[in-house]
């Protein structure tokens, strides 16, 4: 496990090497040939040394058998040798002064237990030598900003060397994204393939890129997060800096998770937990390569958008209708035009046009009218962005018509005069040629070649992230330190509720009794209908064994229920240890919530909040966050629930005191954490809420079986 602290200077040393040695250089190796070609074509300014075990000429250039023979310092070594030669080559390049090395070679952790052991040994060797490693099982990196292309596959041409930085645990995925970026004129600052992450991992690069002026958005392809706690800290820093992180996370399903483990030997946690992490820390999640790149491209140009909706413009009514549906599904508002704008638009529009957002300009619109229309709608302050769906920009001169030329000229004029963030997109995905790039130089505008659908989705995510940014700027309340009670280990429901009560969590008044007479006596003091529940540390789900009796109104019902319940439980669970019976007042006509803590493989203790009672397993309406959480974050969790409307009052029940509820749930999370690392799960189901009345009615603890 990588426990090294973040060190941006080490990342800089890797990405900006003063010299490079290609170790394993050979005319027979396409990796070697492409690595040398990429460095030359990228105009790398430093010396490039070729290392060949036989000292043979490579691409007509002299080689050395070992780095030690160079008598010149080597800053970065790119190791492209068979598995068994990796360690000797690493030692050799380290002795030549290398600060960093890239290991292309595969056959390590992704191959199973033996590979994991070999990878750990390699990591120890590198640490002893003082060399930081990228890989193994990776393709290298492309530094477009400083022209250091230490990469072992073909590099698609990039015109714009700033904007999006791509960091990927999969080398091939990074390659595909680079190719797509070239086709769609997406500016890239860096492309990094991290592979098995023996040393440098995604977190190191994100931390470095937050402060990189050439990077406006960070795009990640991740199968796992090896230092999740540190990644969260870095994500929080990115949010404070206003630098968005867009993620495509593998392992959403069982098959995908197994594939991810096979690919890099990594563990993949619960995908629902990762959704919660994204919600909690403002990470933008995507689900395909083209969505990842389109979203990152848009966000590299928007920055933090103002609070508002989208103005959609096109000369196609059909596209406007599709856009309206897409925007609604994405949760993006399309505000109607204000009265002042409605009064101005008729003088700009063709007479057959209807004034409505999305705005259909119709095929009768003139290029000059396009300019006036854009300037007119940009006056409306509740438009965070404007999207114009138009003809695809030509790929060659023969495709350029006078109407297209004039349209884009006028659109460009308007876009460069307005303050509102505006984009032009084509109806369907397109490619950007060298000729297209020359047109974009003549008509400076934000052009999205990903098409209407992806553009709308990307803008919706940009608006969501901007809202997250504003929330985090306003709510930077630090979570207080959690007290620890390692000696406390509640086993049964009674013990768990008693513990919560000592922590200030409101719990139902409950009594543990040993006989029906005691149950009757306690019921008299409550003066309401009561509930009887079997008390046993061995029975987690009491309803399933007949261990719950509800709404008992008199002594006879209590006595009969007590006897029959004991009998049912003895039959169902003859080996269970019985502590007695719990007597509590009956609670109804309220909302039942589930509040639980569980431990994720990657992210550690997480809290779940959702609709509770017997429906929780069917509805699965839950929100998750990494613990600890403050009351504001709990409020955002409740807002996520499909059943959130129940909290506002439903069929005669009073509206819930949501502020108090959020404080109670936050406090519950702290109480759960206080029990220490041996607690695997703690579940309060239900947490009963009615108006400002809040009580934990039931509690369950599950402890690590291996703990003492």
Image (cartoon, rainbow, N blue to C red):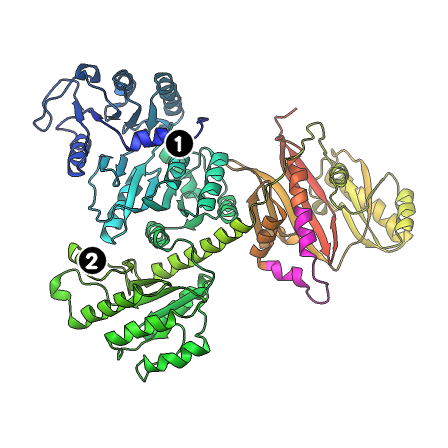
Asked if residue 200 is positioned above or below residue 447 in the image, the reply reads above
Secondary structure found at label 2: helix
Closer to the camera in the image, 250 or 449: 449
Neighbor class of circle 2 (other Cα within 10 Å; few <14, some 14-19, many 20+) is few
Residue 621 in sight here: no
What residue is shown at x 23% (from left), y 70% (from top)? 407
Neighbor class of circle 1 (other Cα within 10 Å; few <14, some 14-19, many 20+) is many
Q: In which quarter of the image is residue 432?
A: bottom left
Q: In which quarter of the image is residue 398?
A: bottom left
Is residue 280 found inside the magenta-colored segment of the image? no
**What residue is pinned by disc 2?**
441
Mark 1 vs mark 2, foreground winner is: 2
Asked if residue 159 is positioned above or below residue 455 in the image, the reply reads above
What residue is shown at x 29% (from left), y 58% (from top)? 450
Q: Quadrant of residue 345?
A: bottom left
The single residue placed furthest to the bottom in the displayed view is 351
Magenta stretch mostly in which secondary structure? helix
Please state if 350 lies on the left or on the right of 274 as rendered: left
Residue 217 in sight here: yes
The label shown at residue 265 is: 1
What residue is shown at x 23% (from left), y 67% (from top)? 408
Q: Quadrant of the N terminus?
A: top left
Region in magenta: 643-665
Please state if 214 lies on the left or on the right of 664 as rendered: left
Mark pair 1, 2: CA separation: 46 Å
Locate residue 683, reporting x and y percent.
66, 43
Is residue 656 found inside the magenta-colored segment of the image? yes
Locate residue 254, reporting x and y percent.
45, 43
């Amino acid at each position: 496990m990588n426990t090294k602290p973040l060190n941006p200077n080490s990342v800089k040393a890797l990405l900006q090497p003063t010299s490079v040695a290609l170790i394993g250089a050979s005319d027979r190796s396409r990796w070697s040939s492409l690595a040398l070609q990429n460095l030359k074509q990228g105009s790398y300014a430093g010396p490039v040394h070729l290392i060949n075990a036989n000292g043979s000429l490579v691409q007509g250039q002299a080689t050395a058998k070992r780095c030690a023979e160079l008598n010149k310092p080597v800053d970065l070594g790119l190791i492209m040798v068979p598995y068994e030669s990796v360690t000797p080559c690493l030692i050799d390049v380290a002795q030549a002064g290398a600060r960093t090395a890239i290991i292309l070679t595969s056959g390590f952790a992704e191959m199973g237990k033996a590979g994991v052991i070999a990878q750990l040994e390699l990591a120890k060797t590198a640490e002893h030598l003082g060399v930081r490693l990228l890989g193994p099982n990776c393709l290298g990196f492309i530094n477009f900003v400083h022209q250091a292309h230490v990469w072992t596959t073909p590099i698609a041409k990039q015109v714009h060397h700033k904007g999006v930085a791509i960091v990927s645990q999969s080398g091939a995925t990074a390659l595909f994204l680079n190719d797509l970026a070239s086709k769609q004129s997406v500016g890239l600052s860096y492309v990094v393939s991290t592979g098995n992450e023996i040393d440098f991992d995604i977190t190191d690069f994100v931390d470095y890129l937050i402060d990189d002026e050439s990077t406006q958005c960070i795009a990640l392809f991740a199968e796992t997060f090896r230092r999740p706690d540190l990644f969260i800290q870095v994500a929080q820093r990115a949010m404070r800096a206003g630098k968005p992180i867009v993620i495509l996370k593998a392992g959403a399903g069982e098959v995908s998770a197994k594939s991810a483990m096979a690919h890099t030997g990594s563990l993949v946690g619960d995908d629902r937990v990762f959704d919660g992490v994204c919600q909690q820390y403002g990470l933008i999640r995507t689900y395909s390569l083209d969505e990842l790149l389109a979203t990152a491209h848009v966000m590299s140009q928007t920055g933090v958008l103002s609070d508002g909706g989208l103005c959609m413009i096109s000369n196609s009514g059909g596209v406007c209708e599709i856009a309206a549906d897409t925007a609604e599904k994405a949760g993006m508002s399309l505000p109607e035009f204000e009265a002042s704008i409605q009064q101005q638009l008729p003088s700009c529009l063709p007479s057959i046009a209807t004034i409505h957002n999305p705005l259909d300009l119709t095929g009768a619109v003139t290029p000059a009218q396009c300019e006036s229309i854009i300037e007119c709608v940009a006056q409306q302050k509740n438009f965070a962005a404007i999207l114009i769906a138009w003809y695809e920009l030509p790929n060659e001169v023969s495709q350029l018509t006078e109407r297209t030329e004039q349209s884009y000229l006028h659109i460009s004029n308007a876009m460069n005069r307005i303050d509102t963030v505006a984009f032009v997109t084509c109806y369907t995905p397109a490619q950007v040629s060298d000729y297209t790039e020359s047109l974009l130089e003549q008509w400076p505008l934000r052009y999205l070649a990903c098409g209407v659908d992806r553009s709308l989705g990307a803008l919706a995510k940009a608006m969501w992230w901007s809202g997250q940014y504003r929330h985090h700027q306003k709510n930077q309340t630090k979570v207080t330190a959690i007290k620890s009670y390692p000696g406390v280990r509640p086993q049964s429901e009674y013990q768990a509720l008693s513990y919560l009560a000592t922590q200030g969590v409101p719990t139902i008044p409950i009594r543990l009794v040993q006989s029906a007479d005691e149950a009757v006596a306690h019921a008299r003091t409550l003066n309401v209908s009561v509930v009887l529940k079997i008390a046993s540390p061995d029975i987690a789900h009491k309803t399933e064994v007949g261990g719950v009796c509800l709404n008992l109104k008199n002594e006879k019902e209590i006595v009969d229920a007590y006897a029959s319940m004991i009998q049912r439980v003895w039959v169902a669970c003859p080996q269970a240890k019985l502590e007695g019976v719990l007597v509590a007042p009956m609670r109804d006509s309220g909302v039942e919530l589930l509040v639980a803590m569980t431990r994720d493989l990657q992210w550690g203790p997480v809290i779940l909040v959702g609709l509770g009672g017997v429906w929780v397993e069917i509805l699965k309406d839950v929100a998750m966050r990494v613990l600890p959480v403050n009351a504001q974050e709990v409020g955002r969790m409740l807002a996520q629930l499909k059943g959130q409307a129940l909290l506002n009052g439903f069929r005669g029940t009073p509206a819930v005191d949501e502020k108090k509820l959020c404080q109670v749930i936050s406090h519950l999370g702290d109480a759960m954490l206080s029990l220490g690392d041996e607690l695997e799960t703690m579940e309060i189901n239900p947490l009963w809420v009615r108006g400002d009345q809040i009580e934990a009615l039931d509690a369950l603890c599950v402890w690590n079986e291996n703990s003492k």
